[in-house]
Amino acid sequence: MTRPRTDGAPGPERDTADPAPSAVPLPAPGTDPPHAPAVLAPLPTLPTLPAPARAVSPPAPLGPGPSTVPASGAPGDEHGPPTRRFLARATLVTASLSVAAALLGLVRDQSLARLFGAGRDTDAFLVAWTVPEFAATLLIEDGLAFALVPAFSVALARRAQGVPGDPVRSLVAGTLPRLALAFTAVGALLALAAPQFVAALAPGLPGPALAVDCTRLTASCVLSFGLAGYCSAALRAHRRFLAPAAIYLAYNAGIITAMYTLGGRWGVRSAACGVAAGGCLMVAVQLPSLVRQLRRRRVGGAAPGTVAAARPLDVPLLATVLLFALCRQSQVLIERFLASGLPSGAISHLNYAQKVAQIPMTLSMMLCTVTFPVVARALADGDTERARGRVERDLALAGRLVLLGTAAVVACAPQLIALLFQRGAFTAQDTAATAAVMRVYALGLLGQTLTGVLVRSYFSAGRASWYPVAAMAAGIAATSWIGARTVGSWGVTGIAAANATGITLTAALLLAGTGRHGVPIRTAPVLRELSRPLRAAAVAAVAGALVAGLPSAAPAGLAAGGATVAAVFVLLAWVLGAQGFAPALRSVRILTRRLAHAVLR
């Protein structure tokens, strides 16, 4: 077994080439926006390229000297297939940092609520917060990563094949300057057009000047997030996961520091300054590790100065992925557009409710970020059966996890919001309004999770697919139509209901289209399996809500309601025959007997 490298990437081992992890560690909630990034970079070849041959290189010299790319199979090699232990250790690194970043993100939201409450100022900032939300989804997580990770993987494979020059450096030279120029231009245009952006996004917002100021500050994150996403994709393709997993720690730390140091003088504008500073920190955290990877040289390569022709990015794939991510993130635009005409605080209540309600979805989606390269590798090998089995298991397990979390959120919403946010400028009325919205949001968590699992199966082959874009567009159309007709009578609750309905429609369409456009999963068995924990979650939510309302203190109510939800959900799912619960209960009984024997003997 090899020790982890100094840049945080554990080296693969020689004992097995099984790419599937033996156990998935506890998933970690991601930070905003709601979709967590891909953890591991698959090693596919683009559909138009032949599979690269392995280049046999002599072992790297011991002791000091120029850094070299090791031979295939050596510790730290980015060319050989990842081992089971490598995936488990890399997942543990990413999950641990994701947990820490999520906790810091919660501190960030608590600080925003404590310092500025849920009123006109926070509504103005949250309009500007749309910029980093979109930038993170398009440039760091779903969008750019699906195009850049395969491109860097192909460049690394060509490097191992022994082509002249260094394809990795050539790819960077051919793409990074142009992308950086595009990011700069878009950010500058957004800053100049901030008044028009705010007017279009939130036409009913009173006093838009504050939102315009915050938008101009957050516009800088288009460049910083774009560079951070580029670094993350390159490092994951090199199997370096520590720095990419740490970026949201740096980001949240920058926002929190800015709010507490500048909030007294600048008000909520300090949070926008923190977004700008946090984006720069995201790049700074990854830059040293990326520079080290780019300075490496393979042994036995071409003569110095030889330049390799860089392969272009897969433009159709990039277009479909970016359009899907844009459509999915446009749910936020619709919500804030509709809520801008409601009384002050409506946008803030939607924001806080969504942040908390999406924690179960983020927890369940961590599994898919780990298994995404496994599905991609199976498809690259032509093993559709293995890919189908993996996707079906992901759907079942992610569905069980998110339904348990949904039951807990619905049952304990008032206690959870009160414990997290009710202090300072965040009043009891804000708690009641946010809890009511969160319960409705939670009804769409299963659809959110299924959408996240299924869309990865569509793009695992590394080729463009327009069907997910059409499915997401249909969900957005449903959200817009229902939201416009319910906001007048139901207010923010109608907006949340429209969100849940639209994403559930998208999940249903993606599930129906897998046989023709994606991994051909068996839909009927998957739906039968999901129906069992769904029924258990409905009963558990009702029982948990009754118990949670008995204690007067929020912490006691949350503890009692959460324990009730967990117990009822597990027992009822076991009775209904849901997969995975009988072994879990047997393990609990065995562990309980062992503990009792150890204590009483």
Image (cartoon, helix red, strand yellow):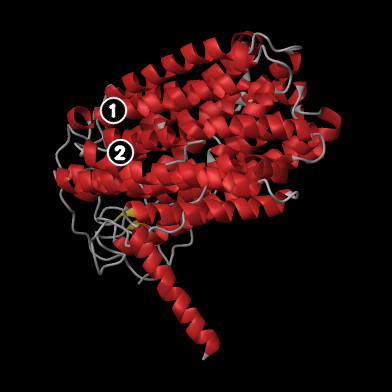
- Give the x, y percent position of residue 598: 50, 86
x 25%, y 60%: residue? 71
x 59%, y 23%: residue? 493
Total number of numbered labels?
Answer: 2
Q: Quadrant of residue 344?
A: top right
In the image, what residue type sits under mark 2?
Pro
Viewer can see residue 486: yes
In the depicted view, which residue is nearer to us: 592 or 235? 592
Q: In which quarter of the image is residue 449?
A: top left
x 60%, y 51%: residue? 561
- Give the x, y percent position of residue 229: 47, 36
Task: Tell whether label 2 touches label 1 (CB within 8 Å).
Answer: yes
Residue located beneath label 1 in the image: 314
Give the spatial CA distance, label 1 vs label 2.
9 Å
In the image, what residue type sits under mark 1?
Asp
**Quadrant of image for the N terminus:** bottom left
x 34%, y 64%: residue? 583
- Give the x, y percent position of residue 559: 64, 55
Viewer can see residue 254: no
- Give the x, y percent position of residue 113: 74, 36
In the depicted view, which residue is nearer to us: 375 or 245? 375
Residue located beneath label 2 in the image: 150
In the depicted view, which residue is nearer to us: 372 or 156? 372
Disc on res. 173 = none
In the depicted view, which residue is nearer to us: 108 or 588? 588
80 vs 243, left or right, is left
Name the element at disc 1: loop
Badge 1: few (under 14), some or many (20 or more) residues near its Cα, within 10 Å? some
* Sequence order check, earlier mark of 1 and 2: 2
Badge 2: few (under 14), some or many (20 or more) residues near its Cα, within 10 Å? many
Name the element at disc 2: helix
